[in-house]
Amino acid sequence: MFRLLEKSMQDSADNIYHILNGDVLKEYFPDEIVGRYIVMRECLVVGPTPDGDLDDFFKARAAFLHEEYSVSPEEYERNAKPELLKIATIPPGVEVNMWFEDDLFCQVNMWFACSLLCKIKPEPHVFLVRPEHQNPYQFSCVVPEHLPVLLNERISLPSKTVKGLADLWGAYQTEDRNQMEKLAKQMGNKLQFLEPAVEAHLARLPQNGKPGRPEQVITEILERNPELGFESVFRLFQSKEAIYGYGDLQVKSIYNRVKEKTKHKK
């Protein structure tokens, strides 16, 4: 009897997948949430995201992360790529819970995940688990004991919505601004966080010879407080532009670019 119950619980766990937004969430994910875990170890919000063959996509990402953040190709092959391939090979018809925050960093990764999920037939039953509304950009503010509550409050994403998010990824790849705005508006009634994320993305793109919003913000911070070091600038940027969800590596790249421009002006 006990063995039958144990097998039944294992069978149930095998049909539940959790796509987590990073290793930090995985570290304090409670054991009581059953299922298989997949960890997104990417930052698709920066760098090339070529359309087409997945192998070419992974090569482009590995090359960028090596050049930009000194991540070795071997490390990418070992840690990031296998997790992404797990999404593409999720069995048909299972339950998939996507744990993503509302910021642009998380959203772009989620759109990519949806582009893989919508190719699985029969389609999995997809749900979105978000942080508490007081902290929409931070699962880290949630105590582990409250994560099962968030799971119970998850949003069901019908196949049409998953396809829409996959299309949003495609528009992101091709830099189709109009399509991104259109798709975000179409899904905005149910997923209100999409339009702010898309607006933040479009605002960070250079226009008419002017840098994007993140660079402008960091430039303004340094103009007002030229003595500030990176850590202080990073905290100020996070307080002003949490919508981007940038980590220290992403902000440091912009900070270095601004400092270099300032140096050449002198």
Image (cartoon, grey):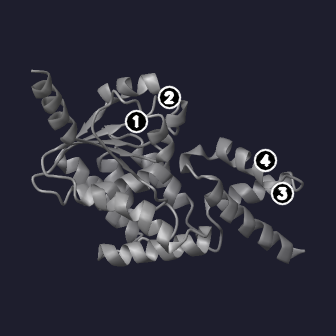
- Image quadrant holding the N terminus, namely top left
Q: Where does label 2 land, which residue?
A: 142
- Mark 2 or mark 1: name the one nearer the start of the chain: 1
- Mark 1 or mark 4: name the one nearer the start of the chain: 1
C-alpha separation, residue under disc 1 versus residue under disc 3: 36 Å
| Residue at 78 percent of width and 72 percent of height | 260
C-alpha separation, residue under disc 3 versus residue under disc 2: 36 Å
Report x, y in % for residue 23.
Answer: 48, 46
- Mark 4 or mark 2: name the one nearer the start of the chain: 2
Dot label at residue 130: 1
Decide: is 61 above or below 8.
Answer: below
Q: Is residue 43 left or right of residue 92?
A: right
| Residue at 55 percent of width and 59 percent of height | 203
- Mark 3 or mark 4: name the one nearer the start of the chain: 3
Q: Where does label 4 land, which residue?
A: 232
C-alpha separation, residue under disc 4 versus residue under disc 2: 25 Å
Q: Where does label 3 land, which residue?
A: 223
Report x, y in % for residue 81.
Answer: 39, 64
- The answer to whether mark 2 and mark 1 are in CB contact below 8 A is no
Q: Nearer the viewer, residue 216 or 69?
A: 69
Q: Is residue 185 left or right of residue 47?
A: left
Q: Secondary structure at mark 2?
A: loop
Please state which of the two labelled residues, at mark 2 or mark 1, is closer to the viewer. Answer: 2
Q: Amino acid at mark 1?
A: Arg
C-alpha separation, residue under disc 1 versus residue under disc 4: 29 Å
Q: Amino acid at mark 2?
A: Val
- Image quadrant holding the C terminus, namely bottom right
Q: Amino acid at mark 4?
A: Ser
Q: Secondary structure at mark 1?
A: loop
Report x, y in % for residue 59.
Answer: 42, 77
